Every structure is written in structure tokens, then in C-alpha cells.
Image (cartoon, rainbow, N blue to C red):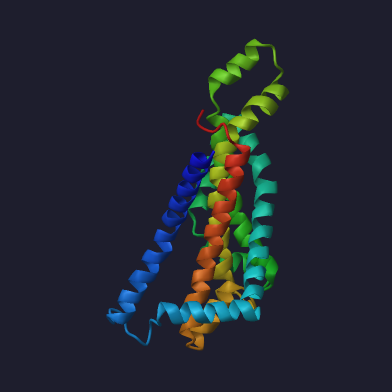
Amino acid sequence: MQRLFGIFQNQKMRRIIELAVGPMLLIAIWWIAFKGQLVNKDLLPSPFDTLRDTAANIAAGKMTQDFTHTLIRVAYSVAIAVIAGVPVGIVLGAKAAIYRSVEFLVDFFRSTPATALFPLFLLLFGLGDLAKIAVAAFAAWLVIVFNVAYGVMNARQTRILAAHAMGASSLRIFRDVIFFETLPQTFVGLRTAVSLALVVIIVAEMFIGATDGIGHRIIDAQISYSLTDMYGSILIAGAMGYGLNLALLATERSLVHWSGK
């Protein structure tokens, strides 16, 4: 038992070290660039000053409020995209003729930068949160539709044929076979959609009349030349995206444990 505990502890410590390498490498490169003046010292603050000021802003609650506002907007965008995108993706994937009929539209808008659609959504929804959420939801919706449809179309035929041979109805085949076969691809689309929604929301907060959020904080700090706040806000935005991706990966491993088997 003690030996097993020791092995577990070693594995846990190794995992912690592996996770720490990336942040430590980032800080090291930043410090070298700052100390060696590879970048103008007036444009690049010390990483340690940035981390200290960021921690102070988090403790004061200022950055936490902006973080929360951005996270809520992303959550609304992704929820809308999932609710509207999964059924559409299933329909398109189940009927190849339907998918071919609208493939151009899906690929065209999926290839169009979401930021290019800002003026259109501003005209439709105004300058409030609705426009920001709508454009992010639309961009995420396209990704989810494409991935769900792709997952349905590429469900393993051997399992579907086996279910047919056992006399299962079309509804049951979809519920018990196709649905679960599409989940791995659906989660791939969901992770991509969350990352895209976060990018769109951050950019929208920068330029579409926002008064809060991480994007607004970044652009406000840049205008006021508060560099440690600007860099710290960028780090927080990256941490948000990384954390959301980790949460989705953990959910996927828990729910889609048969993936690849």
C-alpha cells in the first residue's frame, strides 16, 4: 500500500511539474525580453510587476467584476449556439441531400471573420450586450452545426448496421447509436466554439461601446498607458480560455469515455 501511495505521489508531482513548465517558460522569456531590453522598456513592464499588480486588482475585486461580465457573455453565447446548433447539425448530418444544399452557406459564413459581421449586428441589435452576444453566438453556432453534422455523417456504419440487424427502429438507432457516436465530434466543435466565442466577445468589448469586461479593461488600460494592467488583463483573458478548455476536456473524458474505442 505504501509503495502504491508513493507511486501515486510521484505521478502527481510529475504532473504538477509538467503543468508548471509552460507558465515558467513564459515568465522566463518575458523576463529575458524585459531585462535584456529586447523590447522597448517603456512598452514592456516587468513580468513580476505585472503579476503583482494583477493580484492586487483581483484582490480589490476590480478585475474579478470584469472577468465575470465577460464570462457571462461567453456563457450566453455558447448556450444559444448549442441550443440552436445541435438540432440543426443533426438534421443536416442525417440527410446528406439537405447538407449538400446548404453546404455553401455554412462554409461561407464559417469562413467569414466574425469581426467583419460587427456592423451588421450593430444595425440589428444596437450597441448593448445583445449585439456582442448575438455575433459571438452566431460564430459559435456555425462551428457547432458543422461539427455535429460531420459527426452524424461519419458515425460508424458497422454499429448502425448491427442495430438494424437486431431490429431496432430508426428512432432507437439514432438515440442509442448515432447520438453517442457523434458526441466526440460534438465536443471538438464545442471547445472550438467556446474559444471563438471568447475571442469575439473580447474584441466586441474593446470596440462596441462596452463599459465593463476584460476586453474593455484591456483597451482602457492601453489608452491610459497602464501597461501592467493591460498585460495582466491579457493574461487573465488567456487564463479564462485555458480554464474553459480544461473544463470541457474534463467533461468530455467523463461523459465520452468510449471515444476512440
Rendered residue at 55%/47% (across/down) = 249
Q: Position of residue 90 (x, y in %)?
A: 64, 36
Q: Nearer the viewer, residue 261 or 70?
A: 261
**Residue 129, relative to residue 100: is it above or below?**
below
Q: Position of residue 11 (x, y in %)?
A: 46, 46
Could you say which quadrant of the image residue 97 lies in?
top right
Rendered residue at 63%/68% (across/down) = 70
Numbered label tally: 0
**Residue 16, relative to residue 53: is it above or below?**
above
Rendered residue at 59%/42% (across/down) = 252
Could you say which quadrant of the image residue 184 lies in?
top right
Q: Is residue 68 visible?
A: yes
Rendered residue at 60%/74% (across/down) = 208
Q: Nearer the viewer, residue 211 or 245?
A: 245
Q: Nearer the viewer, residue 198 or 1?
A: 1
Q: Going by the image, does 106 lie left or right of 174? A: left
Q: Nearer the viewer, residue 99 or 168?
A: 168
- Quadrant assignment for the N terminus: top right
Q: Is residue 207 visible?
A: no
